[in-house]
Image (cartoon, grey):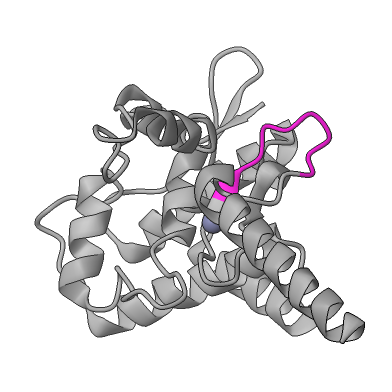
Amino acid sequence: MIEAMRTRETPEDRPVRVPGGDKHPSLAATMRAKTAPGQLELIQRLMNTARPGLADRLADPSKLKSWLVRYNLMTDEIPVQPGDVALVQSFRSLLRSFILQTASDAETEALNALVAKVRPKVVFCTGTSIALEGDTNSIDGVLSQLLAIVAQASMSGDLKRLRLCKNPECGRTFYDRSKNNNGVWCSMMTCGNKLNARTYRTRKTISNDEET
Ligand SMILES: [Zn+2]
């Protein structure tokens, strides 16, 4: 069994904060249900740092550093350079394509090249477990830690449950707990109902046009 970094606090240990969740408890519950288990939540959160119409939350060294330190992926005293931002943004983009199974051959090749450069460290532990480890002192170490989580989630089958919300204006990555792994909305209450209502209005307009 391959494990990711085990010393870090998992996102699961902390409650998921949903904006406006105190006013809309049912929406908050839905969003929590669409949150990936264990450390995979970090990958989900990484994907959601770039969404349509919203500012990139990793857009500069300062923002990237805050995000990495917040999730214990990097220690506070390590400097983050503009090149690190470009590297993480590229990793995020390639990983998104891989997870959503839309990666071109060139993207897969680029992701493999990036992994070859980062070289996660394989550590044999007690029993039969093997850990993939990355340090918290460099951007390569950060990517190693994230790759370890991706590798573990791929083998457990959890990775394929990360999906992109069908609402193109939303673009949120959510964790699909549906029985048949065919969920399409990050939230039925927000995106699902909104899009279904729009589709209904469009169909009604077409139908009215056809009648006249
Ligand atoms: Zn959505």
**Residue 164 horizontal/vertical position (percent):** 63, 58
| Residue 142 seen in the figure | yes
Give the left or right position of residue 207, taking residue 160 as reference: right
Residue at 12% in and 53% down: 76
In the displayed orientation, state which residue is furthest to the right.
Answer: 211
Q: Nearer the viewer, residue 94 or 179?
A: 179
Query: In the rendered image of this protein, does residue 175 appear above or below residue 68?
Result: above
In the displayed orientation, state which residue is furthest to the left.
Answer: 77
Question: Which region shows up in magenta?
Answer: 174-182
Query: In the rendered image of this protein, does residue 173 appear above or below residue 17?
Result: below
Residue at 52% in and 30% down: 33
Residue 176 covered by magenta stretch: yes
Judged by its main secondary structure, the magenta piece is loop
Where residue 138 sits, quadrant-wise, is: bottom left
Query: In the rendered image of this protein, does residue 135 appear above or below residue 131?
Result: below
Give the left or right position of residue 114, taking residue 77 as reference: right
Which quadrant of the figure shows ligand 1? bottom right
Query: In the rendered image of this protein, does residue 122 appear above or below residue 1?
Result: below
**Residue 23 horizontal/vertical position (percent):** 25, 35
Quadrant housing the N terminus? top right
Give the left or right position of residue 84, taking residue 160 as reference: left
Q: Nearer the viewer, residue 154 or 49?
A: 49
In the displayed orientation, state which residue is furthest to the front.
Answer: 212
| Residue 132 seen in the figure | no
Residue at 51% in and 58% down: 172
**Residue 129 horizontal/vertical position (percent):** 61, 22
Residue 187 covered by magenta stretch: no
Give the left or right position of residue 59, taking residue 52 as reference: left
Where residue 182 sits, quadrant-wise, is: top right
Residue at 38% in and 34% down: 28
**Residue 21 horizontal/vertical position (percent):** 30, 36
Where residue 167 sits, quadrant-wise, is: bottom right
